[in-house]
Image (spheres, rainbow, N blue to C red):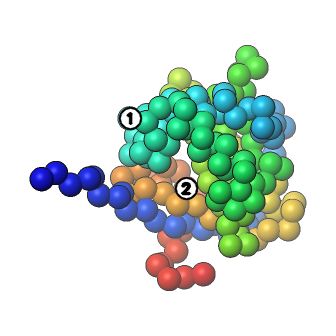
Amino acid sequence: MTHPPAEPMRYRLDASLYGIRVRMDHSFRSPTRGDIPLLGALMWDAYQGTPDERDVGDGVPSATEEVRLTFDGEYGPFLPEASFVAEEGGRPVAAALVTVWREVPLLAFVFTAPSHTGRGLARRLIEAVMGSLVEQGYDRLSLAVTGQNTRARALYESMGFIEVPVGSG
């Protein structure tokens, strides 16, 4: 008898936005519904072979559906004005998608094309998200990270995110 793989352990991390000074990167743009197919393909490329692969299903169609669900409010109302896309040659190479979950902004997804990792795009996208949220009057940004995704967790912690104990607001 085989058992399905256990659901990966996830941790909630929050960053206070009080008093942060973030330089905005004006080379990014807000995503539109027309971007959904390209963002789905990018998401699949970025998540394939990582500890988070199962979050986006089993291919481009399921990853595209995850992006569509995010736009449609499955994870709380989508905030296009706090979500950003980085492009190269007119094509998305990284993105950060933000929703509001239980009245707190949630970094629902951040992903970078494998060909563009290690260039600081995710950090710059998250900084743009934080700056936009501050301008909108928010004081906190939340996210969930898979325990095995040590690279992502290290990035988040270096940006001031701290683990929120289970059962905390």
State the residue position of label 1. 49
Q: In the displayed image of the protein, which residue is found farthest to the left?
A: 1
**In the image, residue 155 above or below residue 112:** below
- Answer left or right for 27 relative to 150: right
| Residue type for callout 1 | Gly
**For residue 66, which quarter of the picture?**
top right
Pick the quarter of the image with the C terminus: bottom right
Q: Picture coordinates of residue 135 (x, y %)?
A: 87, 60
State the residue position of label 2. 156
**Does residue 132 appear in the picture of this structure?**
yes
Q: In the displayed image of the protein, which residue is found farthest to the front?
A: 1
Q: Picture coordinates of residue 150 (x, y %)?
A: 40, 51
Q: Picture coordinates of residue 116 (x, y %)?
A: 57, 27
Question: Which label sits in the foreground, 2 or 1?
Answer: 1
Residue at 59%, 30% in the rendered image: 42
Report the front residue among 54 and 11. Answer: 54
Report the front residue among 80 and 21. Answer: 80
- Answer left or right for 82 relative to 117: right
Residue at 37%, 62% in the rendered image: 9
Classify 10 Å Cα crowding around label 2: few (below 14), some (14-19), many (20 and above).
many
Classify 10 Å Cα crowding around label 1: few (below 14), some (14-19), many (20 and above).
few
